[in-house]
Image: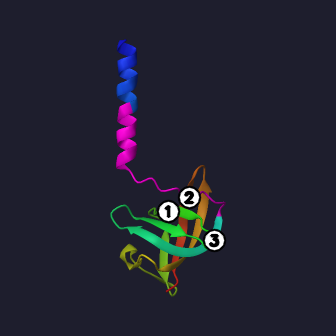
């Protein structure tokens, strides 16, 4: 009985944690360069969600080595705007995408 109670409490905790987070369905693509629209820009997390023309949603967490440019010049992260067009060069590492370079197109 004690094991059942513990299992139920654990499962309840998982459900609570899942309900707190955002349930975005994101896609993992092959390493390469993609264009799309920055649907969401999370400045605190240095994270963007990019929607590609073929309706894939890429979740990208910037690293210290991610290069962000606009018109060939390096720009700060706050230059990214939601609904702005971007080109991203990503490297697939397991089940996540690492942005190597992001160019603001507009």
Disc ID at residue 60: 1
Density class for disc 1 (Cα within 10 Å; few <14, some 14-19, many ≥20) is many
Whole-percent x, y for residue 7 in the image? 40, 23
Magenta includes 25?
yes
Whole-percent x, y for residue 49 in the image? 48, 66
Disc ID at residue 9: none
**What distance separates the C-alpha of mark 2 from that of mark 1?**
6 Å
In the picture of the structure, the residue carrying the numbered disc 2 is 97
In the picture of the structure, the residue carrying the numbered disc 3 is 33
Sequence-wise, which precedes: disc 3 or disc 2? 3
Would you place residue 93 above or below residue 52 in this image? Answer: above
Q: Secondary structure at mark 1?
A: strand
Q: How many marks?
A: 3
Residue at image position (37%, 61%) is: 45
**What distance separates the C-alpha of mark 1 from that of mark 3?**
13 Å
Do tag 2 and tag 1 residues touch (Cβ < 8 Å)? yes
Q: Quadrant of the N terminus?
A: top left
Whole-percent x, y for residue 100 in the image? 55, 66
Span highlighted in magenta in the image: 12-31
Would you place residue 94 above or below residue 85 in this image? Answer: above
């Amino acid at each position: 009985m004690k094991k059942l109670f513990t299992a139920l409490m654990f499962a309840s905790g998982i459900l609570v944690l899942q309900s707190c987070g955002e349930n975005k369905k994101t896609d993992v693509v092959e390493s390469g360069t993609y264009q799309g629209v920055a649907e969401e820009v999370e400045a605190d997390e240095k994270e963007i969600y990019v929607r590609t023309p073929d309706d894939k949603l890429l979740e990208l967490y910037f690293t210290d080595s991610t290069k962000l440019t606009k018109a060939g010049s390096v720009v700060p992260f706050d230059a990214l705007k939601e609904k702005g067009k971007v080109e991203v060069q990503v490297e697939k590492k397991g089940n996540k995408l690492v942005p190597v370079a992001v160019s603001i197109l507009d």
